[in-house]
Image (tube, rainbow, N blue to C red):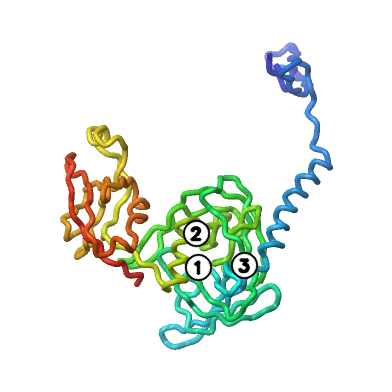
Amino acid sequence: MRAPRAVQAGRWRRGRGREPRCYRRRTVGIGFIDDVSGAIQEPGPLGPADDADALDAYSRAVTAVARTLGPSVASIRVVRRDRRGAQGEGSGSGVVITPDGFLLTSAHVVEGSSGGLRARLTDGRDLALSLVGADPLSDLAVLRADGADLPAAALGDADRLTVGQLVVAIGNPFGLAGSVTAGVVSALGRSLPVGRGRARRVVEDVIQTDAALNPGNSGGALADSRARVVGVNTAVAGFGLGLAVPVNATTRAIVAALMREGRVRRAYVGIAGGPRPLPPRVASQLGRDAGIEVVEVVPGSPAERSGLRPEDLIVDVDGVEVADVGDLQRLMGPERIGRAVELGIVREGARRSLELTPVELSAN
């Protein structure tokens, strides 16, 4: 099989001088070689019917999601007071998750609210809301509407998403109710720092999408092509770059805790750190490559009291392997508050064990 020899062919005609008097050029087309027969085949244009079929399939998917999920996405109005007592209003979105009135939204949408929360549904109902609980460290909040027989959305599993998959965002940007945008999952596994002061945390496995998100979309739904909510829109990180908190097993546990207790309890260790490769000899002994490097130890924290130092490498907690901060966060559930745990660490190339007693992490 040979590739086409040339796109252009020509020849020089020389005159009496050293420079060419003219240059004749003729253009020839490039064909595509058929892998089986070797015959030249001219590329054919995409027909109008093919264009229409592709557009119709895409449109059908998006319109089906909008039709199914749209009634479950509410416009949320928030009344806030600043430090001087002046009153202002904000807006966002929320997703109905139970027929008896529970809604899921972003914690920053309702942060600082002073009452006066209301939700407007696409069927025209305007309902009073009460704040059940908010968790700034996951940027999730649960509200309760004063109503019944609400159209509840189906929750999906973001852990099953793949890059390139179609997703649809429904929310109320700039107060424009029922706005729908579509795009794809641009990336998975992003991290989103949340919280402030001592109470900081990283939301893991954040979904990145190119579906257009604007102010007011926060708290709205990011759905797959079957109208299942796989994310809660939370931030715009740049043009064509939106982020959503994933709906997965971790999120469901947070939502359940907020509905049950109005808050989420977490154990606190008191370090800042990140993943780091293990020394070759230690990696060979443990049969793995990475641990958590301690970059900073918070003064007065459980980590400082245990003797943990910067540059230590944490490799396990109570025998459970950890390779990054996300692994450590997942292990710091309420059951470990006030209970001694054993940290396996590597210090100066040698394995050690430390006993540490986590305390409860305050979101303030």
Q: Quadrant of residue 75?
A: bottom right
Q: In terms of sequence position, does the residue under pointer 1 or pointer 3 come before the other?
A: 1
Q: Judge the density around disc 1: few (<14), some (14-19), many (≥20) Cα neighbours within 10 Å.
A: many
Q: Which mark is residue 357?
A: none
Q: Amino acid at mark 2?
A: Val
Q: Do residues under tags 2 and 3 come within 8 Å of each other at their CB atoms?
A: no
**Residue occupied by mark 1:** 106
Decide if residue 171 is on the left or right side of residue 190. Answer: right
- In this rendering, is residue 286 above or below 156? above
- In this rendering, is residue 241 above or below 259? above
Q: Judge the density around disc 2: few (<14), some (14-19), many (≥20) Cα neighbours within 10 Å.
A: many
Q: Quadrant of residue 282?
A: top left
Q: Which of pointers 1 and 3 indicates the residue nearer the eye?
A: 3
Q: Which mark is residue 245?
A: 2
Query: What's the distance in space between the residues labelled 2 and 3, CA to CA?
Result: 19 Å
Q: Foreground residue, 98 or 59?
A: 98
Element at badge 1?
loop
Q: In terms of sequence position, does the residue under pointer 1 or pointer 2 come before the other?
A: 1
Q: Residue at x 26, y 32 (%)?
A: 284
Instruction: Give the residue at the far bottom of this rendering.
Output: 85
Element at badge 3?
loop
Q: Residue at x 30, y 52 (%)?
A: 273
Q: Which mark is residue 152?
A: 3
Q: Amino acid at mark 1?
A: Ser
Q: Judge the density around disc 3: few (<14), some (14-19), many (≥20) Cα neighbours within 10 Å.
A: some
